[in-house]
């Protein structure tokens, strides 16, 4: 999802804006037809293939699954939705449903990722100090979660056990949760991953680019 589409979806979530017809009409039809509606509907005409695309932006994964619990049915639903959009958009010259296709997008994951990116390095350094008994080398933010790096492979083997992962995840959750303005983390939780300084410096010879590409 493009950044501007995320911002638009965020403003829709906050109630600062509303969709305009025919997208608003289609959104309301979704609720009547499927009992759930997308948070946002993004219409684009793609120059490279000369096709219109409709992105269904779902608030949560639960909403996505309520709309389409069986992905084998997606093509059938796509045909129905495109046909309905063709009907609703007929009076509007800026929209076309000819050769239209659909994709799904998720909002909550991006919102959690944004909250995670707001965590300050100072907060992470303080957490490492508070968890000094674990001898953590580094904590790296990874999209909607984080990776804890220990010094040795032996430490990784020890701390990848569920009881430690849960404890460390909860401690990192406390940092991210205060930036989660929509409360998504309360439902989904957060799970960290672990790795070692040894893996970075010996196996990858300090090549962070190669490490991030592979991991």
Image (cartoon, rainbow, N blue to C red):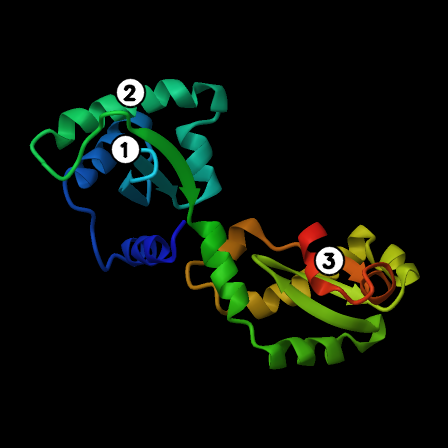
Tag shown at residue 142: none
Residue 117 percent across, percent down from the top left: 53, 67
Can residue 70 be seen in this snapshot?
no
Which residue appears at 14% of the width and 29% of the height?
88
Can residue 144 be seen in this snapshot?
yes
Q: Are marks 3 and 1 in contact (CB under 8 Å)?
A: no
Mark 1, Cα crowd under 10 Å, few <14 / some 14-19 / many 20+, is few
Residue 50 percent across, percent down from the top left: 28, 33
Q: Are marks 3 and 2 in contact (CB under 8 Å)?
A: no
197 with respect to 47 (left or right) = right
Which residue appears at 29% of the width and 28% of the height?
100
Q: Circle 1 sits in a helix, a strand or a loop, which is it?
A: helix
Tag shown at residue 211: 3
Q: Is residue 114 above or below residue 103?
A: below
Q: Is residue 194 above or below residue 49?
A: below
Q: CA distance from mark 3 to mark 1?
A: 44 Å
To which residue does mark 1 refer? 31
First in sequence, mark 3 or 1: give its number. Answer: 1
Mark 2, Cα crowd under 10 Å, few <14 / some 14-19 / many 20+, is few
First in sequence, mark 3 or 2: give its number. Answer: 2
The residue mark sitting in front, 1 or 2, is 2
Q: Is residue 198 above or below residue 78?
A: below
Q: Circle 2 sits in a helix, a strand or a loop, which is it?
A: helix
Q: CA distance from mark 1 to mark 2?
A: 14 Å
């Amino acid at each position: 999802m493009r950044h501007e589409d995320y911002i638009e979806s965020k403003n829709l979530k906050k109630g600062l804006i509303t969709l305009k017809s025919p997208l608003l009409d289609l959104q309301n039809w979704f609720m009547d037809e499927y009992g759930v509606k997308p948070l946002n509907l993004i219409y684009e005409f793609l120059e490279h293939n000369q096709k219109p695309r409709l992105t269904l932006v779902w608030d949560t994964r639960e909403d996505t699954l309520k709309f389409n619990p069986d992905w084998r049915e997606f093509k059938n639903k796509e045909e129905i939705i495109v046909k309905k959009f063709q009907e609703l958009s007929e009076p509007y010259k800026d929209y076309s449903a000819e050769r239209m296709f659909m994709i799904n997008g998720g909002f909550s994951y991006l919102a959690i990722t944004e909250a995670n990116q707001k965590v300050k390095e100072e907060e992470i350094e303080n957490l490492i100090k508070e968890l000094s008994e674990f001898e953590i080398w580094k904590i790296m933010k990874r999209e909607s979660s984080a990776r804890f790096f220990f010094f040795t492979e032996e430490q990784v083997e020890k701390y990848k056990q569920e009881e430690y992962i849960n404890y460390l995840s909860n401690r990192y959750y406390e940092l991210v949760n205060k930036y989660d303005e929509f409360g998504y983390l309360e439902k989904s939780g957060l799970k960290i991953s672990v790795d070692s300084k040894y893996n970075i410096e010996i196996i990858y010879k300090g090549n962070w680019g190669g490490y991030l590409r592979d991991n």
